[in-house]
Image (cartoon, grey):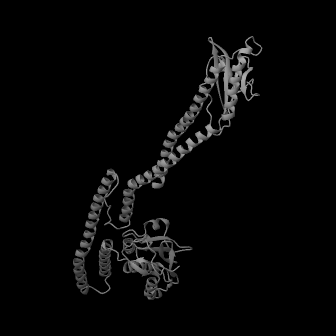
Amino acid sequence: MRTRLLPLLIVLLAAVLLALGVPLAGSVAAAQQQSVVVDRIDDTARFAALAQFVTDAPGGSRRTSTDERRESLRSELESYYGVYGIRAGVFYRNGSAMANAPDDWLVPQTGEVRRAFDEALLSRRSHDPRQVWPWQRSRLVVASPVIRDGDVVAVVVTDSPTGQLRSRILRGWLFIGAGEIAAMLLAVGAALRLTGWVLRPVRILDATTHDIATGRLKSRVAVGGGPPELRRLARSFNEMADNVEAVLEQQRAFVADASHQLRNPLAALLLRIELLALELPEDNEEIASVRTEGKRLAQVLDDLLDLALAEHAEADLRLTDIGALAEERVAAWAPAARARGVRLTGDCPPTTAWADPIALSSALDAVIDNAVKFTPEGGTVEVAVCVDGDTTTVVVTDTGPGLTDEELARVGDRFWRSGRHQNVKGSGLGLSISRALLAAGGGSIDYAHHEPRGLRVTVRVPRHGETGGEPAGVAP
């Protein structure tokens, strides 16, 4: 969830910073240009003041009296161009030069200079030139009219290079960019802390839910930090888990007590049946059937008691050599397999994992017993131990009749038996007990088809302990 929530927060924060940064960058560029434009307007105003008394075109009657002032104006323009590198000139309405620097600079027929010149002829001073951007190699043109007796008699034009202006704008943008990056880093840090604070209770709740789902019913959520809503959820979850555990405990206690209490009356009933059988012929079929059903009922009660104890008992996990344990169970069941004409083999290399040896032994006994029981004479039962990622597996395969897809979905349910095996001895609780024993230690049992025929049962136990460390001596 964090990998989905964090990018969303970062994108939203980046959008906010961009929404603030882009207008700020535009404002910085406009402010820098406006400062330059104001300076140029001041310069053109000063030149216009000097040019007010040098307004006669060349060849006029007052040319002699204005030559000195024209030379003074030209000197000012040349000095201005020499110091700042800004082209400047005073031009009559017809575009001819009163004074200019450099001497070859004139008002073109088109372009930005011409547009500023024409605008000044309308008695409008340049105040809003086109914005200059750092990636544009443009020039900044400012024009001011020279007015005498209310009429525009000439125009002062300046054409400035924009290299320094673009550099100042770029430096301002770099400062803004650095601020945006710093703000983004702070925002990411805050988002990390926020998502961690919000999602930590969710992760704890998820882990506790998994523990309870896998049989560790005493797991509870530690009500700590996080939003108030999640703290209330944690308390409610703990209350629910307490109620579920209490109900299951009552159910287990009832099954155990009922199984235990029924054993004595059943034993007395079986004893009376045996006494009654003494007075009947030895080959009486009814009494034989009653004996068989009585023994079957006694086996069911014993299995119910074992199931209740298996679901209630805590697993005694320890580092166990799964290969040696499986090989021991194969050796123990070998005589029974030979008696039925079944070949039982084992491939059990040394492999360690975390398991309850007694629970795993009981589960393997139930699985191997079923495999030998349902494999016809001349068939084969194989037991193989191997490492599969974070688990160690014990795979038991047989060449028996196997199960259909529908039967595979139900195998392991309490009291369930295939309709084809109703006459085979058993209560239908053996695999249920095995599953309960394995689940208490974090293991599992799965069933699948075995090709070309038969059943494949896979028992898995974790290779890592509670600390998540690799057990010592694990075979590669």
* 283 versus 133 height, above or below: below
| Whether residue 28 can be seen here | yes
Q: Nearer the viewer, residue 91 or 298?
A: 91
Residue visible at 61% across and 19% down in the picture: 124
Image location (x, y in percent) of residue 82:
69, 34
Q: Is residue 103 above or below residue 147?
A: below
| 237 or 104: nearer the viewer | 104
The percent coordinates of residue 75 (x first, y second) are 70, 27
Q: Position of residue 210 (x, y in %)?
A: 39, 63
Residue at (48%, 79%) from the top-left corner? 474
Residue 365 in view of the camera: no
Q: Residue at x 52, y 84 (%)?
A: 378
Looking at the rendered structure, the number of numbered marks drawn on it comes to 0
Is 236 drawn above or below residue 346 in the view shown? above
User: Whole-percent x and y of residue 362?
Assistant: 38, 79
Task: Name which quarter of the figure residue 133 lies in.
Answer: top right
Image quadrant where residue 451 sits: bottom right
Q: Quadrant of the N terminus?
A: bottom left
Q: Is residue 187 left or right of residue 280?
A: right
Q: Depth check: give the residue in front, 406 or 291.
A: 406
Kindly identify the residue that appears in the image at 55 percent across and 41 percent down. Answer: 172
Residue 238, by quadrant, is: bottom left
Left or right position of 332 against 452? left
233 horizontally vs 60: left or right: left
